[in-house]
Amino acid sequence: MKKKIIRLILLFAAVLPISACEDMISEVDVPESDPKIVVFSVISPQYEFITVKVYKSRALYSPTTQQPWEESFPVIPDATVRISNGTDWLQLPFNADTRSYRIASENMPVLAAQTYYLDIKAPGGYSTEASCTVPAGIPPDIEITATDYVENYGERSAMVSFRFKDIPGNGHFYRVISGSYYSDEYYGDEFFSESGLSRGESVFSDKNREGAYFTFRTSEIYTGNKPDVKLLVWSSVTDESYYNYHRSVLSFQGDNPFSEPSPVFTNIKGGLGIFAAVSGRLQVFSLSQQ
């Protein structure tokens, strides 16, 4: 099977206005808000490329003409983006196809327990910096504990229970993504479809659970009558910034105007976003019914 890299989609939170129940206050002094650089980059020893996405935020309450298919924030294509391993600096070129700054990892290998530094300068006087340290832990082996097959309207699906044991020691952070992997004869290609979890968290830590087993169950994965459908589990040990960022995004309830404000974590000095590191592994299991 060809090596597959699961790319995560960055979710940006939006501010939702609330209308007053009674009197409308029409004259309010709103503090001005200048645009900032928004950065998203996750590096890993397992990734083929070092990739950095650089955007510009919109000023608070500013109007937008964004179309549904366009990106939430405008991409900055003419920034100077550099990454360092503490000794050497490497400039990342802008890739027009991916609309990001990227370079093959072989130019600066991402190593476990190594600290990396990010420096970005953009027209208009924008300047940001950040750092992250690659986790030293090795992602644990996944153990399949049960596979339940269900029939819905003549279609067969599987729900897979699995677990893994916490790495010895304290202060570990994890990310788990599960889904199905299948071949399509019509398109002549292979596809990954994330299934989600019906039990267990996708981003979590071992706080108060040191040395314990973490248990999960996938949502229904359609298998049909195809014998080549496989379960993929991407498990990774993450740094604390990755954990804090994704927990803050998951805590944001954009469609609930009565929820408490949930600020999104950032470790970008002079800007917004995240520069983080993970060490992961992809494990594949057959979903063929025994």
Image (tube, grey):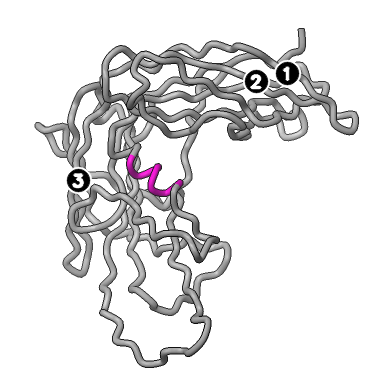
- Extreme right residue here? 154
| Residue 154 falls in image quadrant | top right
- Extreme front residue here? 22
Query: Considering the numbered disc 3 on the image, is that residue within a helix, a strand or a loop?
Result: strand
Q: Position of residue 223 (x, y in %)?
A: 76, 25
Mark pair 3, 1: CA separation:
45 Å
Give the amino acid at mark 2.
Val
Relative to 114, is 41 on the left or the right?
right
Mark pair 2, 1: CA separation:
6 Å
Relative to 178, is 84 on the left or the right?
left
- Split into 4 quadrants, where in the image is the C terminus? top right
- Extreme bottom residue here? 27
User: Is residue 290 part of the magenta span, yes or no?
Assistant: no
Q: Which mark lies nearer to you, 2 or 3?
A: 2
What numbered label is drawn on residue 287? none
Q: Report which residue position mark 3 lands on.
A: 130
Query: Considering the numbered disc 1 on the image, is that residue within a helix, a strand or a loop?
Result: strand
Q: Report which residue position mark 1 lands on.
A: 148
**2 and 1 marks in contact (CB < 8 Å):** yes
Residue stretch in magenta: 244-250
Give the amino acid at mark 1.
Asp
Q: Which mark lies nearer to you, 3 or 1?
A: 1
| N-term-proximal mark, 3 vs 1 | 3
Mark pair 2, 3: CA separation:
39 Å
| Residue 178 falls in image quadrant | top right
**Dominant SS type (magenta):** helix
Q: Mark 2, residues whose alpha carbon is within 10 Å: few (<14), some, or many (≥20)? A: many
